[in-house]
């Protein structure tokens, strides 16, 4: 059996966790600081502060729930629409060749924030994996988070849902 190591995730695991849910509308109004790209009627898009790749996005409902069955059809439609449009923006602006899109539903499935569901959109490129994390515990992020945010933000501000 092969084993994949991701020691850089320790930064997130050991970081101070707020009593506030980062996905709830009331958490913050500072979109740039919190890396929120889009606020819709029922859902939003933000960049992951602990990304696996540049452009790693999170799409989530405003409703604070850890259960898919708690989302109504309007929320579900907006979330799926945002996932489609997010992937299209990443493909256009970041030249992504593919995507890993999914979610970890529940703590036992690996959800870092299990009380509020969220979907991950991770852009991928041919050759974006290498041995740096394995042999030197170093991950290569070619672009600063704020630079990626500034690049993507204008596209998300033009969205019509």
Image (tube, rainbow, N blue to C red):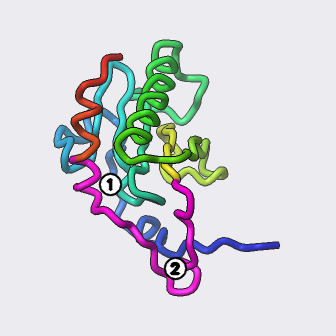
Report x, y in % for residue 113: 48, 49
Which of the marked residues, 1 or 2, is nearer the chain's N terminus?
A: 1
Judge by depth and name the residue closer to the eye, 112 or 89.
89
Q: CA distance from mark 1 to mark 2?
A: 31 Å
**Label 2 crowd (10 A; few <14 / some 14-19 / many >=20):** few
* Residue 2 counted in the magenta span: no
Image quadrant in which the N terminus is located: bottom right
* Residue 147 counted in the magenta span: yes
Magenta residues span 125-150
Q: Is residue 112 above or below residue 41?
A: below
Judge by depth and name the residue closer to the eye, 70 or 96.
96
Q: Which residue is mark 1?
A: 18
Report x, y in % for residue 160: 31, 17
Q: Is residue 159 above or below residue 137?
A: above
Q: Residue at x 48, y 49 (%)?
A: 123
Q: Is residue 72 above or below residue 88?
A: above
The residue sitting at the top extreme is 73
């Amino acid at each position: 059996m092969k084993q994949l190591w991701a020691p850089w995730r320790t930064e997130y695991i050991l970081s101070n966790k707020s009593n506030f849910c980062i996905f709830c509308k009331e958490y913050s109004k500072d979109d740039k600081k919190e890396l929120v790209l889009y606020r819709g009627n029922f859902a939003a898009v933000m960049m992951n502060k602990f990304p696996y790749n540049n452009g790693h996005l999170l799409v989530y409902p405003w409703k604070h729930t850890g259960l898919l069955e708690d989302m109504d059809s309007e929320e579900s439609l907006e979330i799926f629409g945002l996932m489609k449009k997010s992937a299209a923006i990443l493909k256009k602006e970041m030249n992504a060749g593919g995507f890993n899109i999914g979610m970890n539903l529940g703590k036992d499935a690996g959800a870092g924030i299990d009380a509020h569901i969220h979907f991950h959109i991770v852009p991928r490129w041919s050759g974006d994996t290498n041995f740096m994390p394995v042999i030197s515990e170093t991950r290569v992020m070619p672009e600063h988070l704020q630079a990626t945010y500034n690049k993507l933000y204008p596209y998300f501000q033009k969205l019509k849902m």
